[in-house]
Image (tube, rainbow, N blue to C red):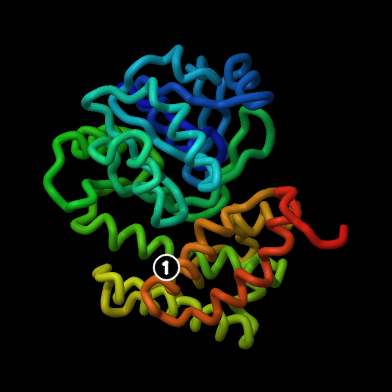
């Protein structure tokens, strides 16, 4: 398949790298020093599933030079989605599928507004991976997993073709769930409380899950997202909260999320797409989400400051 990876950080670098290693025609959309390193030295990935390198690498900062592809994997930060959608338009032809591997639940709608809803699938991934230097990715925890499918749940030859490509790669578990929306909300239910509580407490996951007070906060946050999802008609598993807690407890104790790292390092984060989304959707649906309102309020001043939006004293 001809695949473009839009956003070549930890997520895009790992999954795109595995597809390229398996022989798929993968082009990374990257920029700056990372792009220069990919073109000069290739992609190097340190992984608990086995280290690997891809050389040479197809990479560019100009999607117009790539042409139409079969699939676009979208792995930018959620707050970059609007600009990314407009920039990736030259990659999208009549049969192209666009698969967001994002942390929120609103990406398919946002991409569809720009590129056409008929091109966009639902999608998600699970992995702890990040850039450690130009052209270098480290996958430190969590079995790499991707899932995608048509948003209406219909059978999909195009999704099956992408599934076959992923299943030809090593170090990846891939599937087409029966209900991709429920799967996306399941990921959202994990990543949002863990990211925001980690950002507020400024400690790794092992520390806040082992502290009774913050574990109780985590539990209540999970219950809020479950209640919201069910109100919106999302068919979560019966024991969604318990299953999510089991997943949280299985993560290495020094684990952190990308949103937590961004906030702690003073960079723009995915606060709006994660915690902000819970607050917005809860208000719209009339579902109380007080824990997320607190987490959002606690993190919002720094988010506004790093984006240059703060009107308060410096």
Q: Position of residue 217 (x, y in %)?
A: 57, 82
> Vertical placement of 185 versus 10: above or below?
below
Q: Which residue appears at 19% of the width and 38% of the height? A: 160
**Apparent side of residue 120 relative to residue 210 in the rendered image (left or right):** left
Which quadrant of the view contains residue 183? bottom left
- In this view of the protein, can residue 13 be seen by the observer? no
> Vertical placement of 151 versus 283: above or below?
above
Q: Position of residue 57 (x, y in %)?
A: 50, 18
Q: Which residue appears at 53% of the width and 65% of the height? A: 275
Q: Dot 1: few (<14), some (14–19), or many (≥20) neighbours within 10 Å?
A: some
**Apparent side of residue 109 relative to residue 34 in the rendered image (left or right):** left
Task: Assign the N terminus to one quadrant of the image.
Answer: top left
Q: Which residue appears at 53% of the width and 81% of the height? A: 290
Q: Position of residue 292 (x, y in %)?
A: 54, 74
> Vertical placement of 175 versus 226: above or below?
above
Q: Secondary structure at mark 1?
A: helix
> Vertical placement of 76 versus 261: above or below?
above
Of residues 243 and 222, the one drawn nearer to the viewer in this rendering: 222
Q: Which residue appears at 63% of the width and 39% of the height? A: 131
Residue ranking furthest to the front: 311
Which quadrant of the view contains residue 256? bottom right
Q: Which residue is mark 1?
A: 281
- In this view of the protein, can residue 116 be seen by the observer? yes
């Amino acid at each position: 398949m001809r695949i473009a990876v839009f956003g070549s950080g930890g997520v895009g670098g790992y999954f795109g790298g595995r597809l390229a290693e398996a022989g798929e025609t993968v082009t990374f959309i990257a920029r700056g020093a990372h792009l220069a390193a990919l073109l000069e030295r290739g992609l190097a990935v340190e992984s608990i599933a086995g280290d690997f390198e891809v050389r040479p690498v197809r990479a560019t900062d100009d999607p117009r030079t790539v042409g139409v592809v079969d699939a676009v994997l979208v792995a930018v930060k959620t707050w970059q989605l609007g600009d990314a959608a407009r920039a990736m338009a030259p990659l999208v032809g009549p049969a192209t599928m666009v698969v967001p591997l994002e942390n929120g639940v609103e990406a398919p709608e946002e991409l569809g507004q720009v590129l056409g809803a008929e091109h966009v699938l639902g999608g998600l991934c699970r992995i702890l991976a990040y850039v450690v230097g130009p052209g270098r990715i480290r996958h430190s925890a969590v079995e790499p997993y991707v899932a995608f499918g048509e948003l209406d749940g219909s059978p999909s030859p195009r999704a099956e073709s992408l599934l076959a490509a992923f299943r030809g790669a090593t170090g990846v578990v891939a599937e087409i769930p029966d209900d991709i929306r429920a799967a996306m909300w399941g990921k959202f239910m994990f990543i949002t409380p863990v990211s925001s509580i980690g950002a507020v407490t400024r400690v790794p996951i092992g520390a806040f899950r082992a502290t009774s007070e913050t574990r109780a906060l985590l539990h209540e946050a999970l219950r809020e997202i479950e209640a919201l999802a069910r109100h919106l008609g999302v068919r979560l598993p019966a024991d969604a909260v318990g299953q999510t807690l089991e997943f949280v407890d299985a993560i290495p104790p020094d684990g952190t999320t990308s949103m937590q790292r961004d906030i702690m390092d003073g960079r723009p984060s995915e606060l709006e797409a994660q915690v902000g989304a819970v607050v917005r959707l809860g208000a719209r649906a009339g579902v109380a989400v007080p824990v997320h309102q607190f987490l959002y309020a606690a993190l919002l001043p720094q988010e506004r400051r790093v984006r240059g939006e703060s009107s308060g004293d410096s």
